[in-house]
């Protein structure tokens, strides 16, 4: 039996009285890029925010079902949620630099724990900035405010900030929606490099991006998982009519 | 009426209103400084008052004002800021939150003489602290608490929620998030509330009259009774015996408040300049 990095089992999600995800079952392989795509309000963001339990910040949300990371429930109360979030990193839809320097942003997560030497932190900062294809542009001005970077640079900074923690899974929520094509290309390029080390789940900002970057794709519609498969299956030969209608642009 | 004309009228009107306000405020300051600066000299600042304030300087009221203010702010700050963090970060609008908010809002609207009366009964009499700088400081601390709580809570709430989410996704605990992601962005707003409160402390008259007392001698400790500057010139002006000294005192008070504002802003700027 094949081992999966993440297994989502019979997952239901409610926002107050309203159900946003219906009985979802999905398995994610390690070292692959999975696109979870669908029109607005399909539950893709909610699904991503469930995987690192960020959704729990809102008290009105509640869920049923199970999500396993390496075979262990992420909702297990013995596992600390801060540890989970270090293992499952997240990049948000809009660039979200914290109001501090570039260096402080990238090292934010590293500086939370104790016992890391300055040299080790600096090394991790440099490595993750290189992985996010930003190092060359900022190496001379790590003390500059992160807010002074362009939108595309800020988003790569956010990728670097997540990678600095050496996560196992990286969630990317419509991370290129506000970016120009060049920045988008840089982020997509770094994604295909990153999958060697990480499992990546993205909620692409359009179907074309899903086609470009992913190995597998899952189509969500109004909270239901319609279909899941390899890129070929999903985009050239979808089984479900709703999938083919959406990827060919008949609705959406 | 044409859009251009109404635009012109609106602009003129707003401009006139703003100018009027500025003129009035400037007139008050100029009037006080004009009458007050003549009195201010080295002796005025370094001697204690004699003959009920008609002679001598205002050193002891200056010391009284500063000690009451420092004491009040030092006492009120941790409680006020702590409550603000509790309300903004740790509650989700339950009964406790509503009670605290109702209390702070009620307390904010109470005239200061009522705080004075409470201080007189509780600190001066019941706790036996007597008329003292300590009683005055505690009373004024309670008086400025609502201001500090409300301005700090506002400042904390205005920090974008995404900063918290980012911090959590990077594996921070709630406390680390508050300390490292929320507080740096809220410091300026919190400091503004504190500066506002310092102004109220320095200018407070009624509450300190009933709790810190009115004596003109040099205070020896926080258990000594003392008179604040605002109270000093209130009494001088009421008795009408030394209007020049009253103006001198109010001029010193205005300069002091101005000075506190400048210093506090400089400190805040230095503290939060990084990354903003």
Image: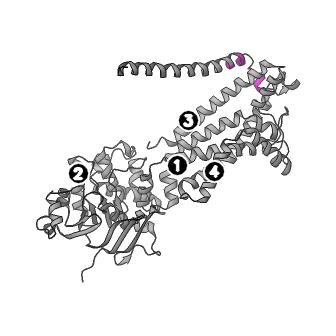
What subunit carries mark 2? A
What subunit carries mark 3? B
Q: Is residue B251 above or below residue A72?
A: above
Instruction: Report crowding for label 1: few under 14, some 14 to 19, many 20 or more residues within 10 A (C-alpha).
Output: many
Q: CA distance from mark 1 to mark 2?
A: 34 Å
> Which mark is in front, 1 or 2?
1
Residue identified by numbered label 2: A184
Residue A120 in picture, x, y percent from top left:
40, 60
Q: Is residue A26 above or below residue B147?
A: below
Q: Which residues are magenta?
A: B32-47
Same chain under badges 1 and 2? The reply is no
Residue identified by numbered label 4: B102
Residue A114 is left or right of residue A84, and the answer is right
> Which mark is in front, 3 or 1?
1
- For the C terminus of chain B, give its image quadrant: top left
Inspect this view and state whether residue B243 appears: yes
Residue A111 within the magenta-colored segment of the rendering: no
Residue A127 is left or right of residue B104, and the answer is left
What subunit carries mark 1? B
Q: Specify which label sits upstream in the sequence, 1 or 4.
A: 4
Residue identified by numbered label 3: B266
Q: CA distance from mark 3 to mark 1?
A: 21 Å
Considering the whole magenta stretch, tell me its main secondary structure: helix
């Amino acid at each position: 039996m094949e081992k999966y990095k993440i297994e989502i089992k019979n997952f239901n999600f409610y926002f107050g009285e309203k159900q946003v995800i219906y009985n979802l079952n999905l398995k994610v392989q390690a070292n692959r890029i999975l696109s979870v795509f669908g029109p607005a309000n399909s539950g893709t963001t909610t699904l991503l925010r469930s995987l690192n339990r960020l959704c729990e910040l809102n008290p009105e949300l509640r869920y049923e079902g199970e999500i396993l990371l390496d075979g262990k429930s992420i909702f297990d109360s013995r596992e600390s949620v801060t540890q989970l979030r270090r293992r499952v990193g997240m990049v948000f839809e809009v660039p979200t630099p914290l109001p501090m320097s570039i260096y402080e942003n990238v090292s934010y997560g590293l500086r939370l724990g104790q016992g890391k030497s300055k040299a080790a932190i600096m090394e991790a900062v440099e490595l993750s900035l290189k992985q996010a294809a930003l190092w060359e542009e900022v190496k001379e001005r790590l003390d500059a405010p992160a807010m002074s970077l362009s939108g595309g640079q800020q988003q790569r900074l956010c990728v670097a900030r997540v990678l600095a923690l050496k996560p196992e899974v990286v969630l990317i929520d419509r991370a290129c929606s506000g970016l120009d094509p060049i920045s988008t290309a840089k982020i997509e390029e770094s994604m295909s490099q990153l999958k060697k080390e990480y499992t990546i789940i993205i909620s692409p900002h359009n179907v074309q991006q899903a086609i470009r970057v992913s190995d597998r794709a899952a189509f969500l519609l109004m909270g239901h998982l319609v279909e899941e498969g390899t890129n070929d299956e999903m985009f050239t030969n979808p089984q479900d009519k709703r999938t083919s209608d959406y990827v060919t642009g008949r609705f959406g | 009426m044409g859009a251009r004309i109404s635009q012109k009228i609106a602009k003129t009107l707003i401009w006139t209103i703003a100018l009027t306000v500025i003129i009035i405020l400037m007139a008050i300051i100029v009037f006080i400084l004009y009458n007050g600066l003549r009195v201010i000299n080295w002796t005025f600042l370094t001697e204690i008052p004699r003959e009920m304030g008609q002679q001598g300087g205002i050193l002891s009221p200056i010391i009284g004002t500063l000690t009451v203010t420092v004491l009040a702010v030092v006492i009120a700050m941790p409680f006020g800021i702590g409550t603000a963090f509790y309300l903004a970060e740790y509650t989700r609008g339950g009964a406790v939150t509503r009670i605290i908010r109702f209390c702070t809002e009620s307390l904010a609207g109470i005239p200061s003489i009522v705080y004075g009366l409470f201080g007189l009964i509780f600190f001066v009499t019941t706790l036996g602290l007597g008329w003292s700088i300590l009683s005055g400081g505690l009373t004024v601390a309670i008086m400025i608490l609502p201001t500090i709580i409300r301005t700090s809570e506002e400042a904390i709430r205005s920090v974008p929620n995404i900063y918290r989410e980012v911090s959590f996704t990077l594996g921070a605990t709630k406390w680390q998030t508050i300390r490292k992601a929320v507080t740096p962005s809220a410091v300026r707003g919190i400091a503004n509330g504190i500066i506002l409160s310092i102004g109220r402390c320095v200018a407070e008259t009624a509450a300190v009259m009933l709790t810190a007392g009115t004596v003109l001698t040099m205070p020896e400790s926080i258990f000594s009774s003392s008179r604040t500057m605002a109270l000093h010139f209130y009494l001088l002006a009421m008795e009408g015996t030394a209007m020049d000294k009253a103006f001198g005192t109010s001029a010193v008070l205005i300069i002091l408040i101005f000075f506190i504002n400048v210093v506090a802003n400089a400190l805040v700027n230095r503290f939060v300049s990084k990354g903003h």
